[in-house]
Image: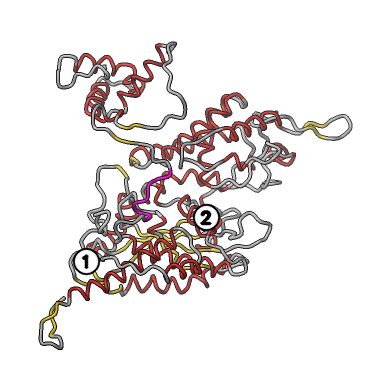
Amino acid sequence: MGTTINDDGNEEDEEDGDNDNDNDDDVANNMLHVNVLNKWSNKSFTMLLGILKDLLPKENANLENFSICQESRYKSNYGKDDGILRHPADGEAWKDFDRQHPLFSQDSRNVRLGLATDGFNPFGNMSNSYSMWPVIVMPYNLLPWKCMKQAFSMLSLLIPGPQAPGRDIDVYMRPLIDELKELWEDGVLTYDASTELSFQMHAAVMWTINDFLAYGNLSGWSTKGYLACPTCNKNASSQWLRDGKNKDTEKACMDLEDMKMRKELHLKRRADGSFEKPPALYTLSSDERYGFCELLKSIKYPDGYAANISRCVNTKGDKLTGLKSHDFHVLIQRLLPIRMRGYLHNDICVALFELGNVFQELCSKTLKMKNLEILEDRTIFILCKLEKKFPPAFFDVMVHLAIHLPREAILGGPVQYRRMYPIERLLGTLKGYVANGARPEGSITEAYVVNECLTFCSMYLGGIETVFNREKRNVDVSVHESGLEVFAQNVRPFGLITRVSNVSQKEREMAHWFVLNNSLELDHYLEQHKNLLENEGVRDITNRQKKEFPKWFKEHVRYNPKLYSATLI
């Protein structure tokens, strides 16, 4: 912006010329963004560019906050010492890192990273054997609901197939490791738009995210044999079995006989010299397996809660294949404890329910430090219950690792910042980029680079649909300000709304408690009533509060006109 002297000797404002250049850049960004978002072909996009010549103004990107969301570019002042884990910054590993490297932690703009990798077949479930390994880096200097999202994850390395790298993965990782070491030791000169100053930004990798098999490749630790557990190391007790691969075979019964335990499951010799394997409490008949699979095919889940598990049931309806890690969690947390009640012995059902409850607590958005310490002991006790019913071959290293999950949560914070769910979703996105089957790596790289550039540019674009302001798939909720918070949303029902006349008293009490327990306006009174019960020395506070709070609250607020609500009491 400024003035120049033209040929006539008159002053000419340069602001219009500057704006024209800005407009050109903005139009290009918008068009490229639409191209990637709608997956246009290069040919159609080139033809469109030959027709469109509109110019749009560009906003100044030199702002403290993003131009669209108005949120901070980086997160500072991590963590609260209140015993609640909300972010990896609340974990012991993050705090210990800050104590060991105070210079790094003093500047909140220094980046903390997580590194994830896993193999996948870019050709889907085809018979073609092909394994490609992307290496993904994600920053944690973000708001909690932005961490681990695809828009903020970076594909830093793509190890080509067709064979998996195995133990040679360190050779492929060498360039990335050199760059990470440079970021840690020397840093890189970075411009801070909020202060309009440059600073030396450093980065540190806090941990890796991978399944147990990939962990063996990355770390070099053998995940098989007597020392398979990296936490227990030499302190783990293990025993060699006849057949450690199958859980319920004749060899599993022979293992019990060798260990001189559970005689009712030992093989019984028939008169003709053959052996009979007695039925165990944990086995299901073919009809029971079929019934359970039919249940999985019929269940409908809330949008975004779980994958379509019905597609994992085979055509015969008695086996499950192709489950992802999140599907297994849905099974153990929600489906198995409920559906197995009519099929298995009560002791096994109780143990499965308790194990599912452990995973539910571990997968909570926020964790309490004192609960995690108790959870570790509970997990050991639950596995001991299962050891009394299931064969020894069932208890391999994968079952053993459940003991260490509460301790890992104490160190690293909530599990949603370190689990494989987002990585598996990203792998599915990368699989969709394959347009040339002969060169899958090239297809993924080209599409990802364009998408990454346009995703960054879309943070500064206004008046156009982006991945940051796009509406969700099922946007059928409107909010009205009148009434209680629990009733503040209008939703689209599945069918015709009818009034049920034969509602039992128990169902009415359950609905009443649901409203009271989920009204934000009553949190203060719920906490006050809970403190009264704690002072009385009540043990089962949850059930006691559920039973007594409605009457207590009715008497407490009946004569207060500001708090009175006939709907509540």
Query: In the shown orientation, is residue 324 left or right of residue 111?
Result: right
- Lower sequence index among marks 1 and 2: 1
Q: Whole-Å distance between the Cαs marked 1 and 2?
A: 35 Å
Q: Residues within 10 Å of mark 1 (few under 14, many from 20)?
A: few
The answer to which image quadrant residue 248 occupies is top right
Give the residue drawn at x 62%, y 66%: 163
Residue on which the image places disc 1: 62
Query: In the shown orientation, is residue 513 left or right of residue 163?
Result: left
User: From the image, which quarter does the N terminus lie in?
Assistant: bottom left
Q: Residue pushed farthest left?
A: 10
Amino acid type, mark 2: Gly
Q: Residues within 10 Å of mark 2 (few under 14, many from 20)?
A: some
Residues rendered magenta in the picture: 466-473
Query: In the shown orientation, is residue 520 left or right of residue 505?
Result: left
Q: Nearer the viewer, mark 1 or mark 2?
A: 1
The answer to which image quadrant residue 535 occupies is top left
Q: Position of residue 268 (x, y in %)?
A: 78, 31
Q: Is residue 471 magenta?
A: yes
The answer to which image quadrant residue 544 occupies is top left
Q: Position of residue 363 (x, y in %)?
A: 42, 42
Give the residue drawn at x 36%, y 56%: 466
Residue on which the image places disc 2: 428
Q: Nearer the viewer, residue 123 or 35?
A: 35
